[in-house]
Amino acid sequence: MGKAAKKVLMYAALTVAALSFIYPFLWMASASLKPENEIGSLNLLSRSFSLRGYQAVFKQIPIARALLNSVFVSVVSTTSILVFSSMVGYALSRLRFIGRDVVFNMVLVTMMIPGQLTLIPLYVLIVRLGWADTYKALIVPAMMSNMGILVFRQFFRSLPQDLVDAARIDGCSDLRILFQIFWPISKPTIITVGLISFIGSWNEVLWPLMVIRKWNMMTMPQMVTLFHVGGLSGAQVAAEMAAAMMLALPVVLAYLFFQRYFIESLALSGIKG
């Protein structure tokens, strides 16, 4: 088999693989615009596309308020993760103190513990603090990320020590070295950690279901889940697909916008020791 034939086969296989991943999303987008009697078809096209599904969502649930809540919680959580995780990553990679390796190993151990095991103790703590049905219940437990700490530590370890020594000679503190020297040259890493953290926070549904009961405090995944399984959609499949599209679209757009930096960071730094 010639090189040209092998290349054609490779591109054909890649095309089939890509279509298998993207078709469900395209079907969901198409179904959100179709009339109910056409949704069962696998065909993506229709002669009577309309926005009735989206209008039903806005009419039946406070989706706009849920969208604002999700944006606020996700942005604040992601910003906190970038700031605090980079500070811990800097300390574990550049500072010498007793117990540094013990702290790093504890961070690694926490990555092995399933998050579901800590839900009940965390829920009891949130209730005792009186934070249920508040933004604090959604944001504070998500302000630090062990994955973020690990990625920042590995990237900061790859930077030359001469950079730190020169900054210290100029009288820079550790905070200035971190935020004025390391941050500007860590753009792909910051975007990668930020994007992963934003997607994780945006898609979180179990924790909001546990700590939020008030309608005006609910997030998008929580509201869409109740819309689907709580009977609020009235069995309108197009409206359910429209709600799912509104939930997925911000994450897809964020990934498409920052895709170049995401791939660049994984290619340059990875999770190497």
Image (cartoon, grey):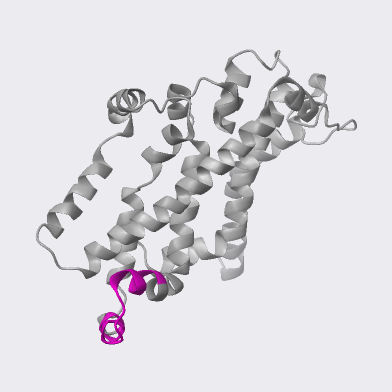
For the stretch drawn in magenta, what is the main secondary structure? helix
> Among all residues in the image, which is located at the extreme right?
47
Residue 215, quarter of the rendered image: top right
Relative to 75, say whether 33 is above or below.
Answer: above
Task: Name which residue lies at 40% across and 28% down.
Answer: 131
Relative to 1, 265 lies left or right: left
Relative to 94, say whether 166 is above or below.
Answer: below
Locate residue 7, reporting x and y percent. Answer: 58, 64
Camera-nearest residue between 60 and 247? 60
Task: Name which residue lies at 25% across and 80% down.
Answer: 161
For the N terminus, the image quarter is bottom right
- Counting the numbered discs, the total is 0
Relative to 102, say whether 207 is above or below.
Answer: above
Locate residue 116, reporting x and y percent. Answer: 33, 29
**Residue 271 visible in image:** no
Camera-nearest residue between 59 and 124? 124
Q: Which residues are magenta?
A: 163-179
For the C terminus, the image quarter is bottom left
Task: Name which residue lies at 34% across and 55% down.
Answer: 85
Examine the structure image and report whether residue 12 is included in the region drawn in magenta. Answer: no
Task: Name which residue lies at 28% across and 30% down.
Answer: 118
Locate residue 17, reporting x and y percent. Answer: 57, 48
Relative to 9, 179 lies left or right: left
Camera-nearest residue between 106 and 123? 123
Camera-nearest residue between 18 and 173? 173
Locate residue 5, reporting x and y percent. Answer: 60, 64
Relative to 230, 173 lies left or right: left
Residue 136, quarter of the rendered image: top left
